Amino acid sequence: MRRPVQWQAAPPSLAARHRPEVQGLRAVAVFLIVVYHVWIGRVSGGVDVFFVLTGFLLTGGLVRAAEQGRLNLRARWTRTLARLVPAASVVLVAVVAAGMWLLPAGRWSQTVREVAAAALFAENWQLAADAVDYEARSQATSVVQHFWSLAIQGQVFFLFPLLVAVIALACGRRTELIRGRVTLALLWLGAASLLFSIGQTADNQPLAYFHTTTRLWEFAVGGLLALHLDRLVLAWKLRIAAGWAGVLGLVACGALLPVASTFPGWIALWPVTCTALVLAAGATGSRLGVDRLLTNPVARWIGDRSYAIYLWHWPILIMVMAVTGGTFADLPTGLAIVAAAVVAAAFTHRFVEEPAARRGGLRIPAVATAAVLVATVAWQAAAMLADRPSGAAGAPTHPGALALADTSIDPAAWEGVPPVPPLVSVHEDWERIERWNCRPLQGFPQDLCTRPRPGAQEPPARRVVVVGDSHAQQLSAALGPIADAENWELTDIVRGACPFSTVSENDPDDADCVAWLAAAFDEIAALRPDVVVTLATRTVRVGLTEHTPAGFVEQWRRLADLGIPVLALRDNPRFDESMPDCVARNSEDPSVCGADRADLYAPEPPWVRAEGVPPTVSFLDIADAVCTPDRCPAVIGNVLVYLDDNHLTATYATTMAPLIADRVRAAIGSP
């Protein structure tokens, strides 16, 4: 009876044989990525296929070259850059050119920054840095966000050759040891990376998603397959079954798994294992094998152009969505986007990728990268020059929230004057407490930050703690001027998407938020501030009910037991689209941006009917500071109120200070 699985030695030449099914696997991966991005708006797991294939092809070639004594790092890196950079640079230059015409001005600064990062194979680190910020506030989807995976692959293209070269150097003339020692290195690297990925995904999934070290294990799996797959001999029927199981598993991955919220932890084993099954199946030569599907002319054609298709599909999609104001594409629009991406990819492959690969050398990649960087600098300079503010917030031309309270202010004063902050940089207009005096909060990545006091040489008159999520943090811009005037010590304890409650209000399964809330409460108990400032309401959005969660009230009662009073503020509105983008599209009449006040706010504050509110809680309704009696607009007093769809600009929040100062002083009191 034939064994279904056995291990046997294999000549090195077998490892080097052509694997035609690899191109078909690339076609499947890019097909899934494009379909899920365009029509479903979810992550498919297709990128993980590319990671495994990169490790598979890269490691096999490196080890063979090292064993034969012809590993040339400079030549290998040069060939890699010549293959990757020209096509990527063409797409990035196209993004810069089209972005000036099609993207709202509010996205320009973000796009310029990320295009530069993408050109330098650092987009994943740019997004990883922003991921901490994403927890606090949303930004419009980046037009080059998909370059994060290319950045990681570029980093691996540098790291793996260096790793193999060091091992080969250590082995000296005993080249027969190289394969085994590379195997050990990949096992250690893969295990460490997988464990880190699981832990980091649980602690900070947005950061983990883009982090290089959380993805290295996927490349390591591909490398181990390249080194030892030829030792595995599967029975014919098992190979057929493995191949189909792998492809069908890949197709099902994005549909069955919550990929966007759980990757790249242990759940990424699904697409990685599926890819390994297809590679293990290999070329069966059977009409029943999946390789028959993967090696047909259409699959090979798409696979050959998969890199260019991947490069083009995302910016075309985001540009179309920016112009139409949509979130997802309908079937006809989606088909047009896919067709445009395939046509652009075909031309890029024919006239850019192939000529650059034939010529080789560093000159073309260097010139291409320089062209991208020059274009981004020119765009940023032109944008900043064209959108310079003509006055400061609070000035007669930009009164901001003061225009709601002072009837003597004449809107004619700012007629023809652009609003502040400039649309081109509005996403950066955020109360950045990380610039304050900060220290870690009991092992969490979020810090406890205290605003520097002008009168620091004297003891503070009051100690005020702001606690909660980003909607609490943004209020610090309004409280800051009041604190400075009264010599109060203002301290922020905030974590994005984690309002001050006894449970995780955003995600019931977010145990890390609950743990942070406990740590924040313990810190407040130790600080013993004169007052705690936090939010009083949630869900100020059209179609949803504004309410005061029971978890909020429970936290207030716990603080009351400690004798710590609370000042709870009503939340600001949330919208279904980015307000700066709406203003950019309707620059002639920005008043159309926003929503009716009655559709956002309850007729009376929800805390009025909340049960169990302790008498130590004072409330501050900020609705009149962000809305007129009938409307909650995107621009008030020629100042942009929001930096996205729900967060206040620091500029506008600062103009709120005079409107709320008396009520804040009354609630906090005097020493």
Image (cartoon, rainbow, N blue to C red):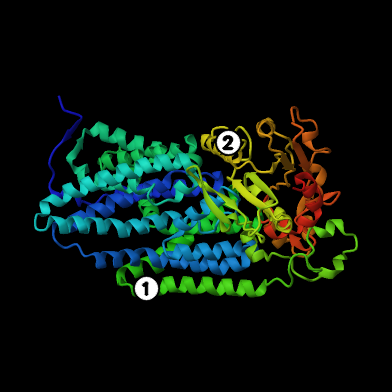
Residue 364 image label: 1
Q: Residue at x 55, y 46 (%)?
A: 39
Q: Nearer the viewer, residue 545 or 441?
A: 441
Please identify the quarter of the rendering in which residue 291 is found: top left
Amino acid carrying mark 1 in the image = Ile
When asked about the image quadrant of residue 7, the answer is: top left
Q: Residue at x 40, y 63 (%)?
A: 349
Picture coordinates of residue 650 (x, y %)?
68, 58
Side of 601 where 386 appears, left or right: left
**In front: mark 1 or mark 2?**
2
Q: Is residue 655 visible?
A: yes
> Of label 1 and label 2, which has the lower sequence position?
1
* Residue identified by numbered label 2: 507
User: Above or below — where is 86 with respect to 610?
Assistant: below
Percent across and percent down for residue 297 are: 35, 51
Mark 2: secondary structure? loop
Residue 147 to residue 562: above or below:
below
Q: CA distance from mark 1 to mark 2?
A: 48 Å
Using a 10 Å C-alpha cutoff, classify the residue at mark 1 as few (fewer than 14 neighbours), some (14 to 19) or many (20 or more).
some
Which residue occupies the foreground of this view, 178 or 532? 532
Side (left or right) of 640 relative to 234: right
Q: Compare residues 198 and 269 and report the one nearer the observer.
A: 198
SS state under label 1: helix
Can you name the residue that lies furthest to the left here? 173
